[in-house]
Amino acid sequence: MPELPEVETTRLGLLPHLKNQTLERLTLRRDKLRFPLEKSALEALLPQTLSTIERRGKYLLFKLQSHTLLLHLGMSGSLRLEPLGTAPKTHDHIIYHFPKQQLHYHDPRRFGSLEILKEGRLKKLGIEPLSDEFNGAYLHQHIKNRKSAIKTLIMDQNIVVGVGNIYASEALFISKISPLREGASLNIDDCTRLCQAIKQELTRAIAVGGTTLKDFIQPDGTHGYFSQELKLYGKKKQNCPNCKTPLEARIITGRNSIFCPNCQK
DNA sequence: CGGGCGTCCTGTTCGC
DNA sequence: TGCGAACAGGACGCCC
């Protein structure tokens, strides 16, 4: 479930501990995650200093001197710092060894990935949702000829990155737009409201995540999810928090989608 | 290129 | 109560 806020919170939690530390080696405990792990190529790169950790969409970029390691958490991935010598738990697939601690990549469903960043790998990604470029005009331009449901379009990483099923549903609820509407049916004003809602939700979630940063270095690996704040997620069969109409659940492009048929038009 | 769907996985929740 | 089935979900590949 990591969407942009969880990835950003992870980045912010790790950075003070790992910036400018030497990544001495990696332990790869399986041959593949989502993709085969490039074992020999990864081993050949190390040791190297980790200069910083950046984020692009839902990807974490571990910047080494000569290369960048690209990590995606998939839907069940998490990272946690552990003392040197800590034994891996079930589903800890990768261990990053640093001089004073080790970083465990944990991912029960193994939808995540680790690869050496190659030229062009991220070139199709859309813009960052928290950038100034992401606004009503940009969104309108990119969806005005599209027949797909608006929810599918804001989750399309080629248009805007970082928005997954949870925050897409929340943002549509806040902006009172039905997730079922065709992209082309939204006018500039709809797009502006939706952009603002996306930015607001992501920003709030990062802020809440920031208050629970310590969780990322706890052995349980708990994330700073925003779950108490979510208005719809996990609430099928409940009533709209605004108007008390029963919430509706529909599958949109294979994703369960919850919305209020009264508030969201 | 757009759009729809299947696929990868396993822990959790659901329904009989 | 206990069991198996369905579900959860990001990104990519495939097909039309």
Image (cartoon, coloured by chain):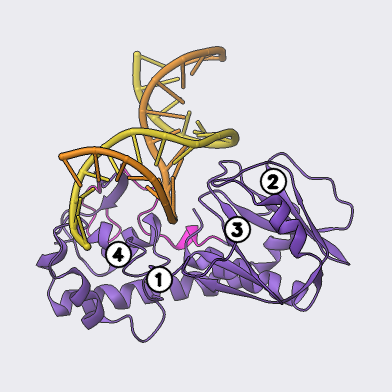
Chain colours: A purple, B yellow, C orange
Q: Which residue is mark 1?
A: A201
In this picture, which residue range is highlighted in magenta?
A: A225-249
Amino acid bearing label 2: His
Q: Earlier in the sequence, mark 4 or mark 3?
A: 3
Q: Which quarter of the image is occupied by the C terminus of chain A? A: bottom left
Q: Earlier in the sequence, mark 3 or mark 2?
A: 2
The spot of residue A222 in percent (x, y) is 64, 55
Q: Is residue A206 above or below residue A222?
A: below
Q: Residue at x 66, y 71 (%)?
A: A67
Q: Is residue A229 magenta?
A: yes
Q: CA distance from mark 1 to mark 4?
A: 14 Å
Q: Where on the picture, by quarter, is residue A49?
A: bottom right
Which SS class for mark 4?
A: helix
Q: CA distance from mark 3 to mark 1?
A: 30 Å
Amino acid bearing label 4: Ile
Identify the mark at residue A154; answer none if there is no mark.
4
How busy is the neighbourhood of tag 3: few (under 14 within 10 Å), some, or many (20 plus)?
some
Q: Which residue is mark 2?
A: A93
Q: Earlier in the sequence, mark 3 or mark 1?
A: 3
Q: Is residue A128 above or below residue B16?
A: below
Which SS class for mark 1?
A: helix
Q: Do the residues bearing badges 4 and 3 touch, measured as CB atoms within 8 Å? A: no
